[in-house]
Amino acid sequence: MAGEVFNPVYALVAALLWAFSPIYYRSFLQRFDFLNLNLLRTGTASAVLLVPALYYGFGAGVLPALLSGAATLACGDSLFLLSIRETGASVAAPVVYTYVLLVQFTAVAVGEAVPGTNFVAAAMVVAGVFVLSRGGRGKPRARGIAFALAGAVAWTVGQDLIKVATVAGGDFVVVTFCRNAAAAAALGVAVLATGRARRWPTGVTPRELGFMALIILSDLVLGSLLFVYSISTIGVAVTVVLTSLSPLLTQIFSRALGKEAPSRQDFGGGALIVAALVLAVVL
């Protein structure tokens, strides 16, 4: 019982880590092309996870993990970065989390029994992210929101594949490495094919690279490890509802750091998300 009570903490810590990264990715996108930045993210994470993955050994679950990386990290995250560039973190992060509703329906396909309260919680999350996406003023958001919604579809496919990989017996460290490696390989091909390798920025200082590496490692290494482990223990449906705390935290942190200025309407949407989390965990 103690383990069951504690397990949700892994997803919540991942949500905390993932709340910071979109805020800083927007500034990175001022220097890097979105595909180059995503290649840097996934390549760095793959390099760090290679030795631990070799230690645990490759076996069952590798194929769905590779497919998950291609769908979620290569396709979904690239669309998410495009959305951040277009609309900012405080809009892109909430809108992309509409994938939470999609996962509630697709989790059944990977053998999970989804409680009725999870559907209610997912609906509340969607309502919350809608309110968040409508707050504030500025340039039109339609294009950025479209990118985020497309990213949500890709994320949905990839998260279910994580469950398939872990159910097949894949170690969560190996699954995390495979996801990043597959994404890095796909993005490397895309960068070369589109000529974006020539757009790699010059003059990036070691200090800037070090800070970028810190954000990347917290996002795609530590955050992803916690996320995959959470899915392997408490399932896809609950994990994605728990990690949907990230949009609210992104709003709070972006304001605290002086990066963006969320409105009362934005925080109202965040309150809906918090209520959904309570419903998902307590009931």
Image (spheres, rainbow, N blue to C red):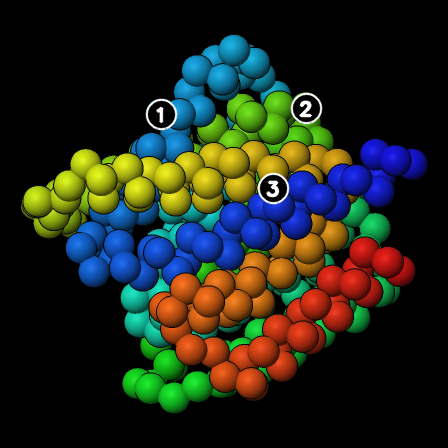
Pinpoint residue 130: horizontal percent, then vertical percent: 57, 79
Residue for badge 3: 227
Give the number of marks. 3
Residue sitting at 43 percent across and 46 percent down?
Answer: 73
Q: Residue furthest bottom?
A: 137
Question: Which is closer to the viewer, label 2 or label 3?
Answer: 3
**In this picture, residue 117 sits left or right of residue 211:** right
Secondary structure of the residue carrying numbered label 3: helix
Question: Which residue is drawn at the image coordinates 79% and 70% (left, top)?
Answer: 120
168 or 98, which is in the foreground?
Answer: 98
| Amino acid marked by disc 1 | Ala
Q: Position of residue 161 (x, y in %)?
A: 59, 41
Local packing at callout 3 (Cα closer than 10 Å; few below 14, some 14-19, many 20+) is many
Which of the labelled discs sits on residue 169, or is there none?
2
Residue 91: where, in percent of width, then height?
45, 73
Q: Amino acid at mark 2?
A: Gly
Q: Is residue 257 visible?
A: yes
| Callout 2–callout 3 Cβ contact below 8 Å | no
Residue at 45% x, 71% y: name it.
255
Instruction: For marks 2 and 3, give the CA distance.
Output: 16 Å
* Marks 1, 2: nearer the viewer: 1
Q: Which residue is mark 1?
A: 47
Picture coordinates of residue 181 (x, y %)? 39, 31
Secondary element under disc 1, as helix, strand or loop, is helix
Question: Quarter-wise, where is residue 226 in the image?
Answer: top right
- Residue drawn at point x = 50 percent, y = 69 percent: 251
What's the CA distance linking mark 3 and mark 1? 19 Å
Q: Is residue 63 above or below residue 93?
A: above
Q: Residues within 10 Å of mark 1 (few under 14, many from 20)?
A: few
Give the structural element (helix, strand or loop) at label 2. Answer: loop
